[in-house]
Amino acid sequence: MSKLNKDILFLIFEELQDNSIFLFSCIMVNRIWCEIMIPILWKNPWCYNINYHKKNSLYSILTSYLLNDIKEFLTKKEILISSQSLTFDYLSFCKSIDTKIIDNIISIGTSSEYNQFLLQEEIYSLLIKKCPEIKYLSICGTREILYLPETKNRLESLCELTINTLIDPRYFYKLANICQQIQRIIIINKNIRANPGTTKLIELQKNLKYFKWIDDFKEEDGFYYWELLEDPYTKIFNMLEKHANTINHFEITLLFDYDNNCNYSNYDYSFLQYTLLRLHNLKIIDIDSPLFLSNDDFNEKLEMVTYRDLEILKIDYMDIYQVTYIIKNCLNLKELRINDFHWNDNIIDGSLNFIHTINENCFLIEYLTIPVFPLFENHLTEFEKLLKKCQNLRSLYFQEAYYEEQRELEFGDYLLNILVKEASKNLREIGIPNDIRFSLKDLEVFFEKWKGRPAVSIYVDEYYFYQKNDSYMKLIDKYKIEGVIKEMNV
């Protein structure tokens, strides 16, 4: 079942409960459906796109499990406690704990910080006892859960962990001793310094497959993080080499700053380049960072690395030669998303080599970004070959890179002709940058020839060009009605 469908179902449950039209009153009508869906929804009830701070029904369910003497004690503290009886044993299906979200739910019962502490003690003790096997744990809130007596038995089989780096290293040491079979680690980095506990936790894992790092710094005492940064990265990322044979998902988001000349800050992010060189079994590379620019040593080593299993490559800023090195043996590549291609001096050879490499290796590509290339015969020939060979291609996005002044429309004419002639029947989306424009006549010819194919969505950067008179809008509306265009952002 898709995540979206689960969200919708969970919202239906919540809406019924929050309006006192309890799901339980419907059980006689379709109890079998409930028996099927409730275990699915309660496997990880903290992952849905809802406002948990207002979900009284979840608070009622959690407090309903408390023993009567505990309920009585908390009620005397003027904490709201539910007395409803439960038709299903919800927590017996639960395999996850998210302390930040559960803390939000607990705050429904009382605004007193002390009373919330009392509730947290009881609720987390309850969860550890009731949840038979914890597979997903997010510790971005209360951390005392790690020291409950039953924690060791419940967390030994943990598969996914989300943490932030401001947590005291001792908590990570505790986790590292208990949990050594974690497959997915997500780190929210809020610390300008290295956290040794995080490094130890990564070191002791035996089957780490998924690593995700997200910078989430805030301004502090008038300073921004980049003015105080003391390298929270190198030790942790170097430790990933120990897991080079198992890690297949590498996802990084680094915050970065520009100087007064719009250059990136001088912080040395090369640790990430060299980590990437070591992780040779990756299936997914997803990096948002300024580091993939000029680095001759990295480029030389990258030429020697092969990512045979790579399926998705998403990088915001990267030199086109580096992209070409990475994909040169990627026979399984399905997505190539580069938001900004950087160039050395030879833009002509670089773009030609890139297109040729796609032709030779990436037959399974479904989503492709490609730089706008010069209108030379070799480039056009290679691009035609690309369209012929890549018959799975569904989305084709051009990135601004090259054009000659006053030749935007001419490029548009060539592009539309090639697409109509060679593009596969699977092509559904085309992205157009500022430096490609289409004449009204060329667009009309293109749409006429596109008839009989699945409807196409066209996304243009410089949409104002097409709004300068009503003719474009009338043309687009006409072919939307005829089912040729699915969407065009004009």
Image (cartoon, rainbow, N blue to C red):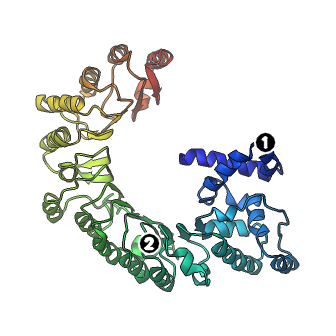
Instruction: Give me the disc on residue 254.
Output: none
What is the number of callouts on the image?
2
Is residue 99 visible in the rendered image? The answer is yes
Q: Position of residue 313 (x, y in %)?
A: 31, 51
For badge 2, the amino acid type reads: Tyr
Q: Position of residue 41 (x, y in %)?
A: 63, 54
The spot of residue 6 in percent (x, y) is 60, 48
Q: Which residue is mark 1?
A: 29
Residue shown at 15%/63% (left/top)?
301
Near-viewer residue (316 or 178) = 178
Q: Which circle, 1 or 2, is nearer the viewer?
A: 1
Between residues 301 and 339, which one lies in front from this camera angle? Answer: 301
Q: Secondary structure at mark 1?
A: helix
Residue at 32% over, 17% down: 442
**Of the pair 180 and 470, the residue shown nearer to us:** 180
Q: Is residue 384 above or below residue 266?
A: above
What residue did someone put label 2 on?
Answer: 225
Q: CA distance from mark 1 to mark 2?
A: 57 Å
Q: What is the quadrant of residue 78 in the picture? A: bottom right
Horizontal side of 101 relative to 85 (left or right) equals left
Left of 324 or right of it: where is 260? right
Q: Is residue 31 left or right of residue 183?
A: right
Residue 12 in sight from this viewpoint: no
